[in-house]
Amino acid sequence: MDLNFTPEELAFRDDVRSFLKDKLPERIADKVKAGQRLTKQDQEEWHAILQSRGWLAYHWPKQYGGPGFTAVEKFIFDTECCLAGGPRIVPFGVSMLGPVLIKYGSQAHKDHYLPRILSGEDWWCQGYSEPGAGSDLASVKTTAVRQGDHYIVNGQKTWTTQGQHADMIFSLVRTDREAKAQSGISFLLMDMKAPGVELRPIRTLDGDREVNEVFFTDVKVPVENLVGEENKGWTYAKYLLTYERTGIAGVGYCVATMEKLKVIAAKVLKNGKPLDQDPLFAARMARVEIDLENMKTTNLRVLSSVAHGGVPGAESSMLKIRGTELRQEMLSLIRRAMGPYAAPYIEAAQYEGYNGEPLGPDAAATAAASYFNYRKLSIFGGSNEIQKNIISKMILGL
């Protein structure tokens, strides 16, 4: 089902499609469509291409280097990039820290960091979760003690995605151990190359090094790296999380995955007929597609609210729940469609240059790896159970 776009919006969609056809490197798009791992160089190349057109920070206002897209243009851009095989824009600087600095950062922060995010000079990671503070994020124990014009930071962060590539980290730290949990937290910008910062990889089930532990031992951080006010970091953290959760929903990626599922189900045979003609499988596909259309509408409502100065609220939690559930269901259906071809784990298939025999547009060798890897979607960014608590408090007043 297509949304009813205006002639201007259809013209914009044509412009985006033309740009992707001309500028998206085929080599990178092929890796994305095959479910292969992207290198940092791949991601930097795509970021630079988008920034050359002014489309990297597509949800930033014009005054800070964004294109000033409308809500519908944001939706179109995101969806078309995913359908074309464009890599995900690495979110930590562009989609998470950027909006926080625009709303709460000092003018010095905006002048220094925002251009460096756009140019790729700074590569950011997120320092939120700790071994004892995941979904219960207010329990962070990493401390920052003020000593003159510096903070001295000690503690540990975990599940730090792409921390091995990052040169900067935005982190939640406890600056008042006597205050109640949420009241004693501050939002600090830290150099990953500073003395006392140690990074240790966490190997995931598929052998990748996507996440890390970060240890801080007497790390000196200039006081001017504090965002907003001391002990007010929980406010900024919640604001960031609404953007993160909206992004985790991955509406564009859901649309692209649905298209991939349709192609596979039309090609794979069961009892001599295409799988999409099997009543049970077709019914599951139909349910997913109906839910996806509903999620598109909710996503547009959230984007429209933000474009008019609003802040994503419970809607971001709704999107996070439904988006992650839908992506997991689609990947489950793809794996089921592959049947025994999805069973083997072939590590080489995760990398560029693999010449194994594919089944349909999605290599069977990566179907299981994608399925297992994305079980994490319903956990990170605040587990779906936590999102249900947020919805019940914000909407039902429970």
Image (cartoon, rainbow, N blue to C red):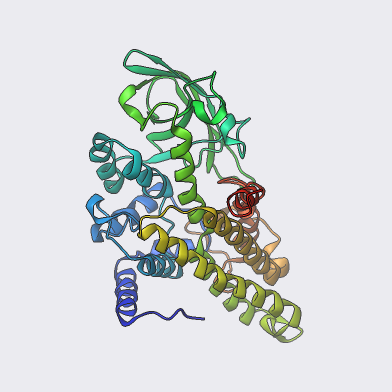
- Side of 66 where 258 appears, left or right: right
How many tags in the picture? 0
Give how far across and how far down residue 204 sits, in percent: 61, 43
Work out whether 18 lies above or below 248.
below
Work out whether 217 lies above or below 278.
above
Residue sitting nearer the eye, 112 or 182: 182
Q: Is residue 351 visible?
A: no
Give how far across and how far down residue 393 sits, in percent: 62, 48
> Can you tell which quarter of the image residue 276 is in?
bottom right
- Side of 71 where 355 appears, left or right: right
Work out whether 197 lies above or below 125.
above
Give how far across and how far down residue 169 sits, in percent: 41, 34
Q: Is residue 15 visible?
A: yes
- Side of 288 where 355 appears, left or right: left
Instruction: Give the residue drawn at x 55%, y 67%.
Output: 295
Residue sitting nearer the eye, 238 or 75: 238
Work out whether 53 lies above or below 115.
below
Residue found at the far top of this picture: 148
Instruction: Give the residue drawn at x 47%, y 57%.
Output: 352
Give how far across and how far down residue 327 sits, in percent: 60, 62
Residue found at the far front of this picture: 397
